[in-house]
Amino acid sequence: MNIEKLKSVLNLVPLPLEGGCYTETYRSTELIKQEWLPSRYSGPRNMSTAIYYLLEPNTFSALHRVASDEIFHFYIGDPVEMLQLWPDGSGKLVLIGADIERGMAPQVVVPRGVWQGSRLAEGGKFALLGCTVSPGFEFADYENGSRHVLSQAYPEFRHFICALTR
């Protein structure tokens, strides 16, 4: 797979703050009015959004959380390690990929408010994922994770937190 050609064909560009490359592929035309949404939203939101998301060896998805649920879909490439840090103080490492027999998941849900970050599994060359968000994603709903704060809150995941923060 020629990664530069993949980026060109799919119009993938660097994703600000988070890292990796992306392109928005869908944004619903219907809106959810602000008064129908929980107070964590600062205005109306599209019902749903979707992106392509590319990880390469020199990139990672920085630990972050958003106001909406996210659903990740694995398309092609190598396995991806996703760290999830939950509000109750627990955490888990999820392997996203096609090899279900080895415990990989081709689809992963990240509930709103869960800290999450991803990187290629060791030795990986690239991974193309999709991410669907509902209510739809807006950059105003994105919160970047702090290495110091998250390491104190989740000390057993410090190694991964350091690898997934800037």
Image: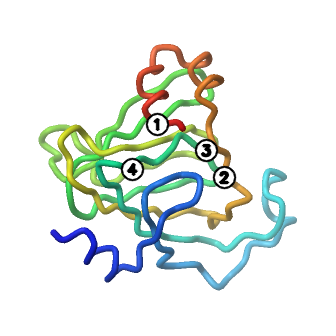
User: Tag 2 or tag 3, which sits nearer the N-term?
Assistant: 3
Q: Residue at x 41, y 43 (%)?
A: 118
Q: Amino acid at mark 3?
A: Arg
Rendered image: mark on residue 142: 2
Q: Amino acid at mark 2?
A: Tyr
- Quick one: SS at disc 3? strand
Q: In the displayed structure, does residue 132 sit left or right of residue 118? A: right
Q: Residue at x 59, y 53 (%)?
A: 17
Q: Which residue is mark 4?
A: 59
Rendered image: mark on residue 65: 3
User: Tag 1 or tag 2, which sits nearer the N-term?
Assistant: 2
Q: Residue at x 53, y 40 (%)?
A: 63
Q: Amino acid at mark 4?
A: Thr
Q: At which x and y percent is residue 144?
A: 63, 43
The CA distance from mark 3 to mark 2 is 6 Å
Rendered image: mark on residue 164: 1
Q: At which x and y percent is residue 43?
A: 83, 66
The CA distance from mark 2 to mark 1 is 16 Å
Q: How many marks?
A: 4
The CA distance from mark 4 to mark 1 is 10 Å
Q: Residue at x 58, y 28 (%)?
A: 147
User: Tag 1 or tag 3, which sits nearer the N-term?
Assistant: 3
**Image marks 3 and 4: residues in contact by CB distance under 8 Å:** no
